[in-house]
Amino acid sequence: MGLHIDELDFDLDESLIAVRPAAPRESARLMVLTLPPADVDDGRSMEVAHRRVEDLPDLLGDGDRLVLNETRVVAARLHLRRLDTGGRLEGLLLERVDDRTWWGMLKRSRRLRPGHRLEVVGADQAPTPFQLGVEEVASDGRVLLQVVGADPMTAVLDAAGRPPLPPYVLKRRRHLGEPEDDPRDTAWYQTAFATQAGTTRSVAAPTAGLHLTPDILARVARKGVPSLKVSLEVGAGTFKPVDVEDLDLHPMHAERCVVDPETWRAIAGIAEDRARGEARIVAVGTTSVRTLESMPDTAPAGEPAVWNTDLLIQPGHRFRRVDALLTNFHLPRSTLLALVAAMLGLNRLRAAYAEAIRSNYRFFSYGDAMFIQRRARRSGD
C-alpha cells in the first residue's frame, strides 16, 4: 500500500497564495533545509535557514551540476463563444494531437456535442477570425477541438492565447478584485531559459525555474557550476487531482521527456564523484526530478533520448540521480507534494510547511521556494 493521501494535507490561508511573482524575481524568499548525512539520518532532524533566491549561487559548490527544465510554456488558455447560443466558455488546451487538433478542458462544456462550433475571442472580447470545431467529448470531460480551416492551432494561440495560469491564481485575483489577466503574465509565467523553438511545449510552467534570472545563472556559471538542460513537457496531468486514498492507485499521467546526448553524458559522467560525495546533481523543480529519475540507463546514440514517463515519486523512492532540489511550495494532496515528501520524509515535510505558514511564505506557482540538500559527511566524523 502506498502513501495515504490524507498525509499530504494541510490548511492554508488564501492570503498566502501568490498572485504575482516577487519583484525582482530573485528577491523571493528561500527556505533552506539541510538534512543530516544519510548514514546518520533519523528522519526528523534538519537545519532550517531563511534566505533569498539570490543566495542560491552561494549554496552551490565544486562538483555541482544545476539541471533545468527548458520546456517552453504555450499560451494555451482560450476564451470562446458558442456560435449557436452565444454562450461564453473558457478553457485550456492540454494535449496536442496534430497541428490543428488538441484535447482541452472547457468550463461549462457539459452540453457541447460533436459538430458544435466555437468562436475564438480576443483579449478585448472581440471576435477573431478563428473558429474551433468540437470533434469529440470524452467521458472525463475533455473536449477534442480542431481548428476550422487550414490554420494550425499555434496561429490561434499566437493571436488569442493567454498564459495558462493555474485556477487558484485566477480565483485569488478575482477575490482581490483584480483582473484575471495581467499583461505581464506572458513574461512572468515563462522561465528565462526556455528554448525559443520549444523542444517540448507545456501547458504549465516548471515553476521553480521562474525564480532564476539571467544574473543568477551567470553567477552560478562564474562559480564553475554548469547548468545542464533537460526538457519535460508539462501536460494535462498536472491539473489532475488525487481522488483516491491510496497514492499507489492514482493513475499517474505520462509526460514526454527529451535529453540530448551531451547532457546525458555529463550526468552519467559524475556518478562515481557523486558516490564519493564529491559532486551533486541539483534539480530545479519537480519536473527536472521526474526527468532525471526516469532517464534511461543507456546513452542515446547521437540523437536526443526521447521517452514518456509516468513515474510517481513518493516516500520510499530511492533517488538515483538527484542529490538536491530547488522547488516551490506545492498544493496539498498533490503528487508534487508526494515527491518532496520522498526527499524530505513526511515528518520533515510537515515541519517545513508549518514553518513556512508561520513565517508567511508565499505559496504555489508565483510563490517562494525551498532548497533541500543533505550535509556531506566530513572527514573524521
Image (cartoon, rainbow, N blue to C red):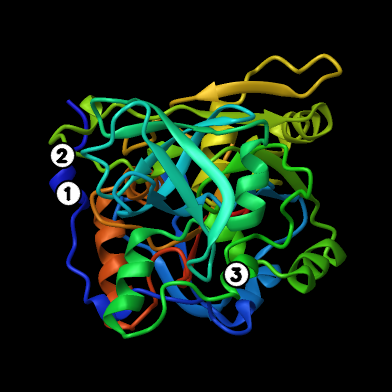
Percent position (x, y) of residue 212? Answer: 67, 66
Going by the numbered disc 2, the residue's amino acid type is: His
Percent position (x, y) of residue 10? Answer: 19, 62
Going by the numbered disc 1, the residue's amino acid type is: Glu
Nearer to us in this view, 93 or 354:
93
Q: Element under label 1? A: helix
| Other-residue count near label 3 (Cα within 10 Å), few / some / many at <14 / 14–19 / ≥20 | some
Camera-side mark, 3 or 1: 3
Q: Are marks 3 and 2 in contact (CB under 8 Å)?
A: no
> Taking the image as drawn, is residue 71 in sight?
no
Nearer to us in this view, 170 or 276:
170
Q: In this view, does 124 lie to the left or right of 303?
A: left
Residue 7's disc is 1
Residue 37's disc is none
Is 57 located above or below residue 259 in the figure?
A: below
> Taking the image as drawn, is residue 357 in sight?
yes
Q: Are marks 2 and 1 in contact (CB under 8 Å)?
A: yes
Going by the numbered disc 3, the residue's amino acid type is: Trp
> Label 3, on which residue?
188
Q: Distance between the residues labelled 2 and 1?
A: 6 Å
Q: Who comes first in sequence, dot 3 or dot 1? A: 1
> Label 2, on which residue?
4
Q: In which quarter of the image is the N terminus?
A: top left
Q: Who comes first in sequence, dot 3 or dot 2? A: 2
